Amino acid sequence: ETGVTQTPRHLVMGMTNKKSLKCEQHLGHNAMYWYKQSAKKPLELMFVYSLEERVENNSVPSRFSPECPNSSHLFLHLHTLQPEDSALYLCASSQDTQGVGNTEAFFGQGTRLTVV
Amino acid sequence: AQKVTQAQTEISVVEKEDVTLDCVYETRDTTYYLFWYKQPPSGELVFLIRRNSFDEQNEISGRYSWNFQKSTSSFNFTITASQVVDSAVYFCALSEATNNDMRFGAGTRLTVKP
């Protein structure tokens, strides 16, 4: 059983919809991340939260809006997405606040998002 | 910026064969970390190994072994006596000590046939 849980596992949404992806980690970690995995590109880091503060935003379009209410929960709010946003969205957590590379990250199973 | 190249897009082997997955990286930092992750069909990335740039010792864990060579900027992964359960996509990743980004390679899809 994974220590990082993502819901929903699958999501189909129209371009005018608003939806949210949820991530919960049960590992006591203090950093959480959103990654995007699409068929055409390698895994891309989208957002980094350390101690509930956003520390990294890799030029992600504003139609993706993250929220980290506490160290165990991370959300990705979606609105007016495009078909090219269809991808697997992976959440991860780690213990080290110094950077994602200083210790291993634990990943959830992802949300498979399809934008129609 | 750091870069990871996994030149092998797909590899197919028959059970019990040995297989090596290649990973070549680029970085300007002297302190960095290298990783291998396994992504089974269920989707989650499973951590396999983390190696820092100052430790070039090769590592063996059961049927898995890793060969880190700074001279060629490579961090290759070998599975000995492969099994069907090893079928997955394997990602090599690099993180520099100076930033928060873990840069992944494109992945190698390994299929082990019975």
Image (tube, coloured by chain):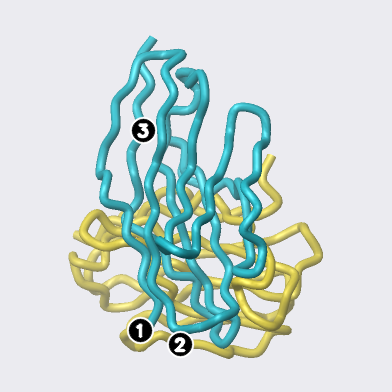
Find the distance from the CA under tag 2 to the CA under tag 3. 32 Å
Q: Amino acid at mark 1?
A: Val
Is label 2 in contact with label 1 (beta carbons under 8 Å)?
A: yes
The one nearer the camera, A18 or B11, is B11
Secondary structure under tag 1 reads loop
Instruction: Write down the chain letter for disc 2.
Output: A
Secondary structure of the residue carrying tag 2 is strand
Please state if A81 lies on the left or on the right of B2 as rendered.
left
Chain represented in cyan: B
Instruction: Determine contact: label 3, label 1, CB under 8 Å.
Output: no
Rounded to the nearest angstrom, the CA distance separating label 3 from label 1 is: 31 Å
- A20 and A84: which is toward the camera: A84
**Same subunit: marks 2 and 1:** yes
Q: Which residue is mark 3?
A: B110
Q: Is residue B113 above or below residue B70?
A: above
Which residue is nearer to you in this view: B54 or A73? B54
The answer as to whether the residues below labels 2 and 3 share one chain is: no
Mark 2, residue position: A57
* Chain A color in figure: yellow
The percent coordinates of residue A106 (x first, y second) are: 63, 57
